[in-house]
Amino acid sequence: MTEEKKEKKPLHESEAAELPPCAGCRGAETDKGTCQGEIFENDLAVALHALEKVRSERDEYLEAARRLQADFENYKKRNVNIRTDAYEDGMAHALKNILPVLDNLERAVYNGSTQAEGGALLEGINLIYRQLAEALQKIGLEEIPALGEPFDHELHHAVMQGEAGEEHKPGRVCEVLQKGYCFKGRILRHSMVKVAQ
């Protein structure tokens, strides 16, 4: 009975290959009808099969975790892009609403400079205009160059035609009626121009 207990202990995979026939029966049939060595080999085969199944499940879970991690990284990148786009859209919308104020300040400075009166008031308005223009430039607002430039339908909106001369060649902008602006490469407002013909 002590020999049977010794032989029933679990075997490692390396020991399974060297398993001799049962010491008590030398390959003969036992009262249960099978050799003790065969029982241990069957137990070992079942254990190896279970181990292989566990390894397979482990590999599946590992692959699923890797896919989930990759999906999460893609989600984070998409989220950053969406936030950036939403921020830029909001800024562009706000800047479009501020442009008429900038235009009116510019007109006030221009009209004030043509009149002799209102020196201190004109200086104050001019200062406000410059501060607002500088603040908007820091945010990213850029004026679209127009005067003297070749007419570009993507940047300029032609509302009038003028005479070509020495100063202005045909097909070039000869007067800017309203400045155009862009924000980070996005046109907020086209320049309203007069084009020489």
Image (cartoon, grey):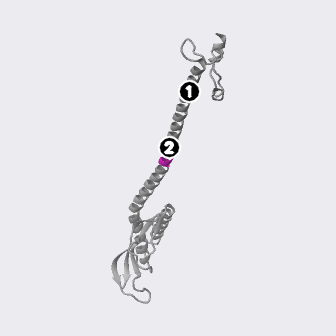
Residue 144: image location, x then y, percent: 44, 71
Magenta segment includes 75: yes
**Which is closer to the viewer, label 2 or label 1?**
1
Residue 158: image location, x then y, percent: 35, 76
In the structure shown, which secondary structural element does the residue marked by tag 1 occupy?
Answer: helix
Q: Residues within 10 Å of mark 2 (few under 14, many from 20)?
A: few
Which mark, by number, is residue 45? 1
In the rendered image, which residue does mark 2 sit on?
67
Residue 174: image location, x then y, percent: 40, 82
Q: Earlier in the sequence, mark 2 or mark 1?
A: 1
Q: Main secondary structure of the magenta part?
A: helix
Magenta segment includes 111: no
Against 151, is 5 above or below? Answer: above
Against 107, is 184 above or below? Answer: above
Q: Which residues are magenta?
A: 72-76
Residue 57: image location, x then y, percent: 51, 34
Residue drawn at (33%, 79%) of the image: 160
Q: Quadrant of residue 28?
A: top right
Q: Nearer the viewer, residue 179 or 122?
A: 179
Q: Quadrant of residue 91?
A: bottom left
Residue occupying the far front of the picture = 28
Amino acid carrying mark 2 in the image: Arg
Residue 54 located left or right of residue 93: right
